[in-house]
Amino acid sequence: MKKLDGGVTAPKGFMAGGVMAGLKKDRTDMAMIHSRIPCETAGVFTTNRVKAAPVVWDKQVVTSGKKSQTVVINSGIANACTGALGMQYCRETAAAAAGLLKEDPESVLVCSTGVIGAQLPMDKITRGAALLADAIAEGRDKANEAARAIMTTDTQPKEVAVTFTVGGTEVTMGGMCKGSGMIHPNMCTMLCFVTTDCAISKELLQKALSDDVVDTFNMVSVDGDTSTNDTVLLLANGAAGNPAIEAEGEDYQTFCEALREVMTTLSKKIAGDGEGASALFEVKVLHAATKEQARTLAKSVVTSSLTKAAVFGHDANWGRILCAMGYSGADFDPDQTDLYFQSAGGCLQIVKNGMATDYSEEEATKILSHPEVTAIADIKAGNEEATAWGCDLTYDYVKINADYRS
């Protein structure tokens, strides 16, 4: 597997673009991804009871079995809590794009992100769809253009691409996502779009995505809020010409490994760009009895406001970590637990068998002062492990969310 400088246009046959539709002031706010070839499509969506209209629409498209070629995305307005009119606007957006690209409207995927409760200004959306139909093209710049157009409070676009070999054929996978606030497991608030020119059945495409999300996007938390619009879409057009993956085996495992690399990279980009964040905070739980035990403990620590604040203050307040593990609901023995802090500044054991080591506070502060910090908990109970990603909790998080609409 090889990483590329690329995004959603890296695989063969995929085009993208971003335009200014007037939903946000002085910046691009609508994007489109388009495949020249109809794609098998898989999706995973928010678990929030309150689901935005585009989530409902896209679930219908994905489960219908129709092949899709186009995704239309707008930022600025979430089209959530908008009733029957919101669904009608999804239909109208899909129809506008389908008419321009000569596709079935029922196969067009629609995504929105932004403020909840406002209705879409359909004159701007329709105009944006027309501009996008003219703007989309292949190439690295176009992928980046689309990635920037879907940003809300993100401070930077989030993209990745890899190549790998399936059945002796080189195939490519690319992705982009947005997410900075309202990020929490099950499924964490974000929009993510992954494209590939690999030929693979719809059933295995969906299985790969559903299985992968458990250890990637479901292990990310910024602020404990799960959104109404969370969506991950995976489109495979088969343009690479590899022997189609129709059964689980070596080729399927290779595909899953590539998907894990793409999704992990994007997950970390979301966590590191959390609203107001100054550091990516990673939590690893080692030697757990079960995978679920490891996941539960890691997520409990990464979501702890007290621990996140300590990371911001570069304070090795390890008691907060053990406390968060203790209320997680997972069974473990604190008297057998070792804790470490690790970053580019080094690795330091701070707890051995549930008690503080004679560590240097100065050394701990140095390690915690780096932009990527890892807390490692070794619970000595088995051979399973899990990793969760989050960020520190800063003053700026409150500032951003206190006046988000104004």
Image (tube, rainbow, N blue to C red):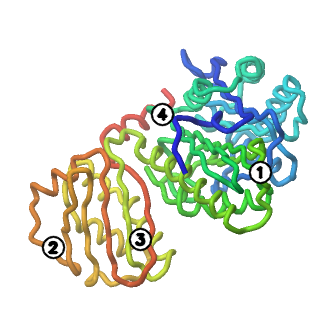
209 displayed left or right of 389: right
Please identify, in this view, whether the residue under mark 4 or under mark 2 is nearer the observer: 2
Where residue 188 sits in the image (x, y, percent)?
Answer: 55, 52
Q: Along the polypeptide, which appears first: circle 3 or circle 4?
A: 4
**The residue tagged with tag 3: helix, strand or loop?**
helix
Q: Which residue is mark 3?
A: 297
Q: Nearer the viewer, residue 234 or 351?
A: 234
Q: Nearer the viewer, residue 217 or 87?
A: 217
145 displayed left or right of 43: left
**The residue tagged with tag 4: helix, strand or loop?**
loop
The three-letter code of the residue at mark 2 reads Ala
Q: Along the polypeptide, which appears first: circle 1 or circle 4?
A: 4
Q: Are marks 1 and 4 in contact (CB under 8 Å)?
A: no
Q: Residue at x 53, y 39 (%)?
A: 4
User: In this picture, is 314 found above or below 149?
Assistant: below
Q: Which residue is mark 2?
A: 356
Please identify, in this view, whether the residue under mark 1 or under mark 4 is nearer the observer: 1
Q: Looking at this view, name the residue that lies furthest to the top.
A: 26
Q: Quadrant of residue 285?
A: bottom left
Q: Along the polypeptide, which appears first: circle 1 or circle 3?
A: 1
Numbered mark located on residue 199 in the image:
1
Crowd tier of the residue under label 4, counting other residues whose Cα lies within 10 Å: few below 14, some 14–19, many 20 or above = some
